[in-house]
Image: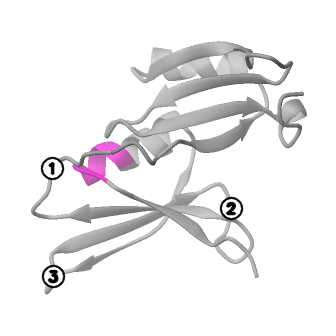
Amino acid sequence: MRLLHTMLRVGNLQKSIDFYTDILNMKLIRQSENTEYKYTLAFLGYGDESNSTVLELTYNWDSSEYDLGTGYGHIAIETDDIYATCDKIKEMGGQITREAGPVKGGTTVIAFVKDPDGYMIELINKKDAGKGLG
């Protein structure tokens, strides 16, 4: 078994695709529409779906925003240089909600960015990925 994808509901599909492709450097892998049930799916990621976990964006044509609730935490993305990544995100108009630095109580360097729908994305330096608090 393996993890295939994570799904997020989005209120503006193109704005979300632009965020994940332009700001977080993901590739749009595929996109499809279901006219009968009025929704569009877009799959994005850093590699091919056959061997990488991807992100599914679901756009329901009759909804422009969602209540994120208290159960959602974040998606984590590895980056080679967290400081340069944060600078690029800010330059491109992205919202950094926690600047890069060590996690509280540890040494792993993390940052947080918010996507257009308010979903939190944790950035983790590649050298620290998989080490927990460090």
Of residues 27 and 60, the one nearer the viewer is 60
Q: Nearer the viewer, mark 3 or mark 1?
A: 1
Q: Separation of disc 2 and disc 3 at Cα?
A: 28 Å
Of residues 93 and 101, the one nearer the viewer is 101
Lower sequence index among marks 2 and 3: 3
Residue drawn at (49%, 19%) of the image: 96
Q: Nearer the viewer, mark 1 or mark 2?
A: 1
The residue labelled by disc 2 is 47
Q: Which amino acid, mark 3?
A: Thr
Q: Secondary structure at mark 3?
A: loop
Q: Give coordinates of residue 132: x percent, y percent.
A: 83, 36
Magenta span of residues: 10-16
Residue drawn at (76%, 82%) of the image: 1
Q: Which amino acid, mark 1?
A: Ser
Lower sequence index among marks 1 and 2: 2
| Residue 101, above or below 44 | above
Q: Is residue 103 left or right of residue 66?
A: right
Q: Give coordinates of residue 41: x percent, y percent.
A: 35, 69
Q: Separation of disc 1 and disc 2 at Cα?
A: 29 Å
Q: Separation of disc 3 and disc 1 at Cα?
A: 17 Å
- Classify 10 Å Cα crowding around label 2: few (below 14), some (14-19), many (20 and above): few
